[in-house]
Image (cartoon, helix red, strand yellow):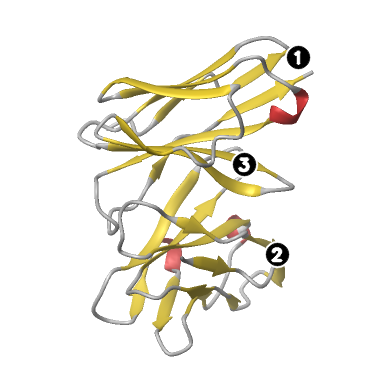
């Protein structure tokens, strides 16, 4: 079985500050990892994904994430956030056993001016 | 491609009425997922199809819910009869088969049952 934990339900941050959104997963097999972003009144959009290879993955809008197998983590980071980054962010894992994605509970990023 | 298209965007109905939500997949995608999102329970997978065949419907709340794929590019989710606790945003997502293929979500249908 696989599970995803996003420890922070809300993260307030000032504009231009750095941010890290935490994601930990559990799985007994190798995994594919994803981050999605959801803007108000929209569906989820893919931000970035880790399939294999380099553990540092770069995505859209200046976000990046690092896969850490020993800590079973896939934290999302951005060095300088913008007001437009205000959204809900979801971490998801697929344990390489088909199409079934397991989503975390989401983290609401609130960027303040 | 226009992406995953869901209709209607908003649906308001009275308790006991039948509700049908519609979804058009991205051309070429062969996996289809229905999710429900609420504040209390977050994002829940209701049912998953692969090549038009339901693979996992363990998330469907009860017999009042049914989903179909009459063809490779279209799906419906029906609730009959609807209840106020069904109020939520329902998302459809499609992808290619394979764990490394990301999901593409529609913009959702916001259902309100009064």
Tell me whether the residue at label 2 lies in contact with that at label 1, contact meaning CB atoms closer than 8 angstroms: no
Q: Residue tagged by mark 1?
A: B15
Which residue occupies 60% across, 76% down?
Answer: A19
Q: Please tell me if label 3 and label 1 are on a single chain.
A: yes
Please rate how many residues cluster around mark 2, counting C-alpha atoms within 10 Å: few if below 14, some from 14 to 19, many from 20.
some
Separation of marks 3 and 1 at Cα, in angstroms: 19 Å
Which residue occupies 34% across, 74% down?
Answer: A29
Q: Please tell me if label 2 and label 1 are on a single chain.
A: no
Residue B8 to residue A72: above or below: above
Q: Which chain contains the residue that carries disc 2?
A: A
**Looking at the rendering, which quadrant does residue B73 occupy?**
top left
Q: Is residue A76 visible?
A: no
Residue B114 to residue A110: above or below: above
Q: Residue tagged by mark 3?
A: B37
Separation of marks 2 and 3 at Cα, in angstroms: 15 Å
Callout 3 secondary element: strand
Q: Which chain contains the residue that carries disc 1?
A: B
Q: Is residue A65 left or right of residue B30?
A: right
**Looking at the rendering, which quadrant does residue A105 occupy?**
bottom right
Question: Viewer-proximal residue, A66 or B52?
Answer: B52
Callout 1 secondary element: loop
Tell me whether the residue at label 2 lies in contact with that at label 3, contact meaning CB atoms closer than 8 angstroms: no
Whichever of labels 3 and 1 marks the residue nearer the N terminus, that label is: 1
Please rate how many residues cluster around mark 1, counting C-alpha atoms within 10 Å: few if below 14, some from 14 to 19, many from 20.
some
Question: Viewer-proximal residue, A34 or B76?
Answer: B76
Question: Looking at the rendered structure, which numbered label has been put on residue A9?
Answer: 2
């Amino acid at each position: 079985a696989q599970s995803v934990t996003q420890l922070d339900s809300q993260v307030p941050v000032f504009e231009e500050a750095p941010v890290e959104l935490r994601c930990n997963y559990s799985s007994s097999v190798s995994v594919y990892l994803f981050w999605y972003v959801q803007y108000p009144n929209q569906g989820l959009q893919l931000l970035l994904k880790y399939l294999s290879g380099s553990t540092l993955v770069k995505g859209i809008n200046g976000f990046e994430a690092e896969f850490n197998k020993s800590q079973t983590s896939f934290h999302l980071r951005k060095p300088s956030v913008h007001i437009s980054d205000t959204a809900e962010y979801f971490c998801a894992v697929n344990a390489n056993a088909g199409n079934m994605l397991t989503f975390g509970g989401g983290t609401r990023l609130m960027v303040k001016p | 491609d226009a992406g995953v298209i869901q209709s209607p965007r908003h649906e308001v109905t009275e308790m006991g009425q039948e509700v049908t939500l519609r979804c058009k997949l991205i051309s070429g995608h062969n996996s289809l997922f229905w999710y429900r999102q609420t504040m209390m329970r977050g994002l829940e997978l209701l049912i998953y199809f692969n090549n038009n065949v339901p693979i996992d419907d363990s998330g469907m709340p009860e017999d009042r819910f049914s989903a179909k794929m009459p063809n490779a590019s279209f799906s419906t989710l029906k609730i009959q009869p609807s209840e106020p606790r069904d109020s939520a945003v329902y998302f459809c997502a499609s992808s290619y088969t394979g764990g490394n293929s990301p999901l593409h979500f529609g913009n959702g249908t916001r259902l309100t049952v009064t």
